[in-house]
Image (tube, rainbow, N blue to C red):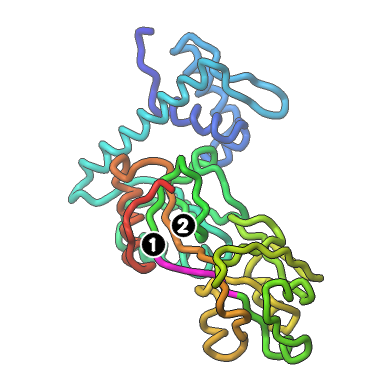
Amino acid sequence: MNNLPPLEDLRVFCLVAQRASFVAAAEELGSSPAYVSKRVKALEQVLGAQLLHRSTRQVSLTENGERVCRWARDMLDQIGQLRDEIAAGGAPRGLVRIGSSVGFGRRHVAPLISTLCQQFPGLEIRFDVFDKLVDLVAEGIDLDIRIGNDIAPHLIARRLARNWRVLCAAPAYLAARGVPRTLEALAQHDCLVTKERDHPFGIWRMTGPEGERSVKVGGRLSSNHGEIVTGWALAGHGVMLRSMWDVAADLEAGRLVQVLPDYRQDADIWAVYPSRLSGSARVRACVEFFMRHLGGATGESTT
């Protein structure tokens, strides 16, 4: 191999590998599938190896493609870090992809990203919200602002703020159906179930005087969108389990009443990322920004 591959070809190839599709990669790049295919073919010619298995539905990496993809990602990351370090004034520059859950992302993270962009004009932010946990590497997410303490051991996490989920219901519902006095009593109530990103559907794991316990709940209404469930609870349809960040104002105003206050579910707010912050000044600046605005950190953890 006499020539080094162009960085643009490496970038396009990594995106095709990530999306497993020429069309999806082209849409993200704002170009045509023909351009993407041309760049990948040029890379294969320079390297003298087939990098992708192509089919009518999707593409997948060959063994050589997997090796090249790992190498290319490392190189692109190092070049991005170099650009960060030599940027004028040391200000972070370049693209950062940030993810979060739908409700928390819309109400809390998105407004902060507006401030983040004003503070760091050299950053380009792509913000995606998800109703389930995603593979950060596969989706190309640099930073996930996440609620919940179940974090995979291969990821790195920094706690941004303490948080917990509580049981609550509208006064009208409790007046009509009575107040549950035990976790087991929840089985006799209409429970409004939310499909959280970090918990199985219909199983509420609670910490109380006896330690951690699980209770299976159900009801006529359920959703994968927490704000919808909160609206149902306010309308008197049942008992829900929601984060304090979501219901604190309603509890204080009396629109909701906490049920079984001796029980709660720890669900702290975390910044989660796939590699050490020393590898990217852009991501490090974003994490430090969210630490300042969401409540102070307690240090890095790989658990």
Asked whether residue 162 is drawn in magenta, I would say: yes
Type of residue at label 1? Leu
Q: Residue at x 62, y 32 (%)?
A: 21
Q: Position of residue 297 (x, y in %)?
A: 33, 61
Seen from the viewer's position, the closer of residues 229 and 139 is 229
Q: Residue at x 78, y 90 (%)?
A: 176
Q: State which region is magenta.
A: 161-166
Q: Position of residue 269 (x, y in %)?
A: 45, 62
Asked whether residue 241 is drawn in magenta, I would say: no
293 displayed left or right of 60: left
Q: Residue at x 55, y 59 (%)?
A: 101
Seen from the viewer's position, the closer of residues 94 and 18 is 18
Q: Which residue is mark 1?
A: 160
Q: Are marks 2 and 1 in contact (CB under 8 Å)?
A: yes
Type of residue at label 2? Ile
The residues tagged by marks 2 and 1 sit, at their Cα atoms, a distance apart of 9 Å
Vertical position of residue 192 compared to residue 151: above or below: below
Query: Which image quarter: residue 251?
Result: bottom right
Front position among marks 2 and 1: 1
Seen from the viewer's position, the closer of residues 36 and 150 is 150
Could you say whether the residue bearing mark 1 is in a helix, strand or loop?
strand
Looking at the rendered structure, which numbered label has been put on residue 115? Answer: none
Could you say whether the residue bearing mark 2 is in a helix, strand or loop?
strand
Query: Which image quarter: residue 112?
Result: bottom left
Report the number of discs. 2
Q: Which residue is mark 2?
A: 145
Q: Position of residue 111 (x, y in %)?
A: 44, 68
Q: Residue at x 38, y 8 (%)?
A: 1
Q: Main secondary structure of the magenta part?
A: strand
Q: Position of residue 56 (x, y in %)?
A: 72, 25
